[in-house]
Image (spheres, rainbow, N blue to C red):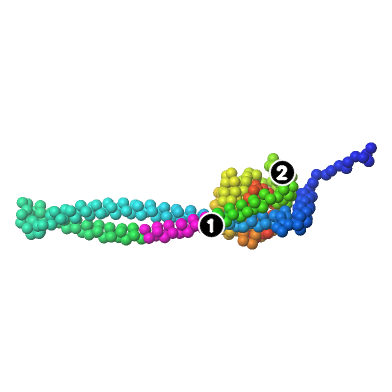
Amino acid sequence: MASHRKPRQRPLSGGTVRTAATLALAGAATATAFEGTSHADPRPTPAQVKAEVDRLYGDAEAATERYNGAKVKADEAERALTGLRDEAARKEDRLNTARRSLGAVAATQYRSGGLGPALQLAMATDPQDYLERASLLTRAGDRTAADVASVRRGLDEAGQLRDKASGQLADLRARQDELAGQKALIEDRLATAQRLLARLTAEERAAYEALSDGGAAPTPAGVPGARTPAPPAPSDGSRAARAVAFAYAAIGKPYVWGATGPGSYDCSGLTQAAWKSAGVSLPRTTYTQINAGQRVTRDQLAPGDLVFFYSGVTHVGMYVGNGQMIHAPRPGSTVRLAPVDSMPWAGASRPA
């Protein structure tokens, strides 16, 4: 009887899953290739689709970091323009007050300007009173001259402010144009990737997802897709420990380009938010975050360090120990654990 029993099947390990997915893609690719011999325009194989989708996602992520940088500069330009406009408005209010004061003085002088000082003295009923008023008028004239000079300076300053605001407005519009261009590029790459993925069958899509997640490290218990326990978060109360704890809490939240939380993140948005929770302000983009702290070598990595990837420094994650990091990988995915060696290494830094 025992000879007729089916052999007991073992659960698939991570390596077995990747091997099975690779074989599935290869089999589909072979079948499609044979089909293509009878068609003028053969359907791309799943392996080709994966390579192209990965390239498109890479382009989109690089454009996302450029978008993030342009947005920071656009926000700065907008704040500067608002400040200049506020300053110009205050200057105009002061100028208008001074102009009204000068206008009142001019009207008074006009009304009394028909009589010379000698005639006014001769006609005065009280010569001593006239002399006292004349002294006051002299001092008032000096003050009026100073007021006129102040108004002239104010007019010059207001003109300079208008010129400066005009230049700041031009800078803001240039930044907004750059933002629009990067946004269009991101959306084009993502839409193209989605169209390619939509051509895969359910089996091919499952194989693609298995290969795409092949570098994913075990996730904590209770998180969808969990397999084995993750490295424990440090609990020494340090800033790095608080940043790592934040990153762990973000696992499972979706990747959204340009997002900084709390419901979704892109790669640099996650690391910025994690360290912000620990009281450390990081710049917005991958290529500025890498220079924001102390550079460390790969063998010096400690939990909380930022790890960067690709030649253009277009991706970042947070090291959590045991050769693993937490990162927001790509559109359509979620914040997760992954091996540090799953992507081309670019460098690492330790926020101060």
Query: What range is drawn magenta here?
Result: 162-180
The residue closer to the viewer here, 187 or 237, is 187
Q: Is residue 205 above or below residue 70?
A: above
**What secondary structure predominates along the stretch shown in magenta?**
helix
The answer to whether 154 appears left or right of 316 in the picture is: left
Which amino acid type is shown beneath numbered disc 1? Gly
- Residue farthest to the bottom, as pictured: 311
Residue occupying the point 24% across, 59% down: 148
Q: Position of residue 168 (x, y in %)?
A: 43, 58
* Residue 274 in view: no
Residue occupying the point 35% across, 52% down: 89
Which amino acid type is shown beneath numbered disc 2? Ala
Circle 2 is placed at which residue position? 226
- Quadrant housing the N terminus: top right
Question: Mark 1 or mark 2: which comes first in sequence?
Answer: 1
The answer to whether 278 appears left or right of 148 in the picture is: right
Q: Distance of mark 1 from mark 2, alpha carbons?
A: 39 Å
Q: Position of residue 6 (x, y in %)?
A: 88, 41
**In the drawing, what numbered circle is on residue 181?**
1
Q: Position of residue 347 (x, y in %)?
A: 64, 60
Foreground mark, 1 or 2, reads 1
Residue occupying the point 62% across, 46% down: 254
SS state under label 1: helix
